[in-house]
């Protein structure tokens, strides 16, 4: 419908229709007739929709100056507060070089190596049934999988070391720029804040994953005694989970990431010691509360990490394009 109009006419094909707005409204109604909305839907003009869409994209993306590098990587965090008092390491690399295609290709190569490693590891462990596999156009037997894993691991280590070096050079570049532009204290404050949240985020992801993994048995039919033993493991992992929830509820760095209902649900969850199973029956409502708490927890820690990462990156981008990112100056 919206294919370009050729020949001597300009615009969209839909513009040729006399009652295009009515037809568009009918099509929209037909397409979304089966959707249940929590609130009454609002009709928007195309212009307003475009503004909202661009705004949402900006809210969930990082500055264009980084060429997508930080869509796949997190900022460098291997420093202490005392390192900010040290002289800068001069990198002699421009923004174009730091975030150019050559460095981006290292990320893509590492991602591909990790994907290949995971597949061959599953084949080697028997999770994938196959006697042979093909890699880089060459055919190998399953007996070759261990050597291939060693090769891939060495390649991944090399790529990770190269990327770690790039991350450090990026950090030093902006540390130098912040000092030159007399905003060093703001840069240090944002960098330290991000480091604290990023390090905690790694721990929180492990806590979340461990508890979620401990509940995997719920997706299959099992003997009651087996379930009881598994629930013991769930309760063990849940203890660490509850301690982490208490931490984010009380720590100011997470305050703005909470929706009101998330905070209320997590507080209510902490008030109970659920059993989840008794005799030969699951307590479904208790399990629903557990999984809702897991979802709320993941939302909060992910949003907190994203916000801290973006705050640091927007500030760094302001050192490149100060007018475009002038809001960062108020940090």
Image (cartoon, helix red, strand yellow):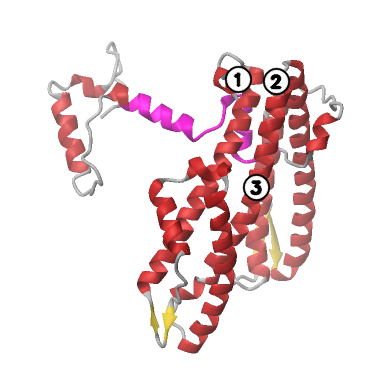
Q: Which mark is residue 329?
A: 1
**The disc label shown at residue 183, or none:** 2
Q: Helix, strand, or loop for circle 2?
A: loop
Image: 274 above or below 153? below
Q: Is residue 271 above or below residue 306?
A: below
Could you tell me what secondary structure mostly forms the magenta stretch?
helix
Q: Nearer the viewer, mark 2 or mark 3?
A: 2
Q: Which residue is mark 3?
A: 111
Q: Position of residue 251 (x, y in %)?
A: 57, 47
Which residue is depicted at the point 42% across and 45% down?
259
**Mark 2 → mark 1, Cα distance in angstroms:** 8 Å
Residue 62 within the magenta-colored segment of the rendering: yes
**Mark 2 Cα-neighbour bin, 10 Å: few <14, some 14–19, many ≥20:** some
Is residue 263 visible in the rendered structure shown here? yes
For the magenta stretch, what is the residue range? 49-75
Work out whether mark 2 precedes mark 3 in sequence or the reverse, and give the earlier one.
3
Query: What residue is drawn where x is 17% and y is 39%?
Result: 29
The alpha-carbon separation of the residues under discs 1 and 3 comes to 35 Å
At a point 55% along the width and 21% down the height, the residue shown is: 327
Q: Pointers 2 and 3 in contact (CB under 8 A)?
A: no
Residue 186 in magenta stretch: no
* Rendered residue at 36%/73% (across/down): 284
- Which callout, 2 or 1, points at the residue further toward the start of the chain? 2
Q: Relative to the observer, which residue lies in front, 154 or 200?
A: 200
The answer to the question of whether label 2 and label 1 lie on touching residues, with beta carbons closer than 8 A, is yes
């Amino acid at each position: 419908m919206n294919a370009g109009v050729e020949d001597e006419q300009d615009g969209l094909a839909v513009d040729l229709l006399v009652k295009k707005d009515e037809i568009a409204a009918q099509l929209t109604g037909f397409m979304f007739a089966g959707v249940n909305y929590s609130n009454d839907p609002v009709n928007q003009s195309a212009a307003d929709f475009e503004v909202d869409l661009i705004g949402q994209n900006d809210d969930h993306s990082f500055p264009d100056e980084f060429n997508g590098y930080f869509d796949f990587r997190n900022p460098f965090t291997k420093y202490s507060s005392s390192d900010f008092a040290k002289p800068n390491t001069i990198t002699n690399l421009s923004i174009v070089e730091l975030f150019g295609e050559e460095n981006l290709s290292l990320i893509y190569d590492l991602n591909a190596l990790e994907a290949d490693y995971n597949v061959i590891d599953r084949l080697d462990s028997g999770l994938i049934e196959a006697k042979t596999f093909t890699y880089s156009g060459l055919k190998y037997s399953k007996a070759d999988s261990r050597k291939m894993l060693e090769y891939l691991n060495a390649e991944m280590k090399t790529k990770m070391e190269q990327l770690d070096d790039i991350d450090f050079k990026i950090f030093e570049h902006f540390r130098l720029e912040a000092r030159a532009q007399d905003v060093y204290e703001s840069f240090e404050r944002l960098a330290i804040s991000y480091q604290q949240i990023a390090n905690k985020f790694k721990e929180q992801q492990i806590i979340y994953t461990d508890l979620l993994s401990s509940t995997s048995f719920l997706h299959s039919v099992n003997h009651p005694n087996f379930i009881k033993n598994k629930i013991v493991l769930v309760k063990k992992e849940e203890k660490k989970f509850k301690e982490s929830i208490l931490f984010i509820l009380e720590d100011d760095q997470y305050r703005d990431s909470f929706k009101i209902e998330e905070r209320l649900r997590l507080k209510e969850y902490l008030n109970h010691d659920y059993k989840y199973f008794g005799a030969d029956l699951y307590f479904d409502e208790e399990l629903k509360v557990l999984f809702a708490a897991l979802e709320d927890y993941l939302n909060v820690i992910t949003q907190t990490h994203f916000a801290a990462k973006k705050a640091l990156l927007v500030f760094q981008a302001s050192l490149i394009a100060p007018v475009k990112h002038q809001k960062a100056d108020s940090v």
